[in-house]
Image (tube, rainbow, N blue to C red):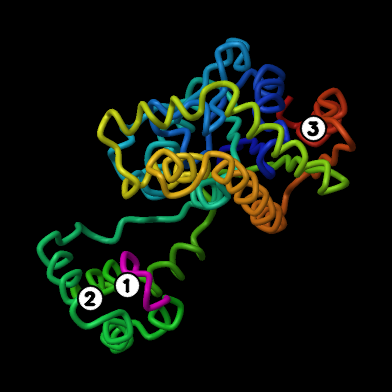
Amino acid sequence: MSGVVVVTGPTATGKTALGVRLAKLLGGEVVSADSMQVYRYMDIGTAKPTPEETEGVPHHMIDVVSPFESYSVSRYVADAAAVCRELLDRGKTPVIVGGTGLYIEALVSGWDFERGPGDGALREELSALYDRLGGEKMLERLARTDPERAGKLHPNDKKRVVRALEIAENGGNITRHDRETRAAPPRFKAKTVVLGYADRADLYARIDRRVDDMMARGLVREVEGLLERGLTPEHTAMQAIGYKEICAALTGRCSMDEAVETVKRESRRYAKRQISWCKRYEDRLDVIFEKVPDFEKAVSLSTNFLKELV
């Protein structure tokens, strides 16, 4: 089993800076675990590291797909796992940096997303049937073959309801597959560094300042550029926090001031969910900052925590 280092935590805690420092210390390279940094042309709103911030450390899984594509956790795992194995083969330590908890867990834990080929024709048929009958009736249909999954899905979650039915009607069962996957041994042995703040108000203040900085750096123009390329609010990439709100302002659904306040509020809510997710990591080191990030402290604590890798 091969070892990796994970640097995670809520947004605006300094994950990028610590990830670079640890990669230098360990002779490693950074593998991004951010569900939106995979998209090209989306730099400011996703807080992609700049060339100055990377300090020459190679970063992977950034700018890998077009924003017109719907990039999924299964695609991420396939791509990022290949990167990690290639780094390990070269004697490099993968330093997985990001705040998308599902991506990190799926990558490290060895989740298997191979459920057989998709059936496009059946999916279209089921989608039309969903529109005609509604979510409740479709869940009743799913419950005949996969009652556990049907009980977990909301009737309004069309995408997941249709996907579950597609798999079920091709002889599969998502619930059984997921249970078997989670029982499998981990793909990588991981040691996780979780960044946080002693006072959540300090974190929220940093988030608000980050949004103001994004606006000053040209987030509005970045969103305008995506719309000019042909992106619409329906594309997955445009559902990211910061992009959907600015898009709403640009299309007259709210004022720009209202959009900015919504970005701040949604970013704070996202940070709260990230904090909850981080509690599930077992072999972890919690680095808690006070008013400002103390990276000397973070590196010192991490060095001791990762001593067998240094």
Q: CA distance from mark 3 to mark 2?
A: 50 Å
Who is closer to the viewer here, 254 or 157? Answer: 254
Question: Which residue is the site of mark 1?
Answer: 161
Q: Secondary structure at mark 2?
A: helix
In primary-sequence order, the first of circles 3 and 1 is 1
Which is in the foreground here, disc 3 or disc 2?
Answer: 2
Count neighbours of disc 3 (C-alpha within 10 A) and say few if under 14, some if 14 to 19, many if 20 or more. many
Quadrant for residue 130, please give it: bottom left
User: In the drawing, what numbered circle is on residue 302?
Assistant: 3
Count neighbours of disc 1 (C-alpha within 10 A) and say few if under 14, some if 14 to 19, many if 20 or more. many
Find residue 153 and report its horizontal and vertical position in percent: 42, 76
Q: Are marks 3 and 1 in contact (CB under 8 Å)?
A: no
Q: Are marks 1 and 2 in contact (CB under 8 Å)?
A: yes
In the displayed structure, 12 sits above or below 51; it is below
| Residue at 29% across, 40% down | 69
Question: Which residue is the site of mark 2?
Answer: 130
| Residue at 23% across, 60% down | 116
Q: Amino acid at mark 1?
A: Val
In primary-sequence order, the first of circles 3 and 2 is 2
User: In the drawing, what numbered circle is on residue 65?
Assistant: none
Find residue 232 and report its horizontal and vertical position in percent: 30, 43
Count neighbours of disc 2 (C-alpha within 10 A) and say few if under 14, some if 14 to 19, many if 20 or more. many
Image quarter where the N terminus lies is top right
Q: CA distance from mark 1 to mark 2?
A: 9 Å
| Residue at 68% across, 44% down | 10
Q: Secondary structure at mark 1?
A: helix
In the displayed structure, 259 sits above or below 148; it is above
Direction from residue 199 to residue 279 in the image, left or right:
left
Q: Which residues are magenta?
A: 154-161
Direction from residue 97 to residue 124 in the image, left or right:
left
Q: Amino acid at mark 3?
A: Ser
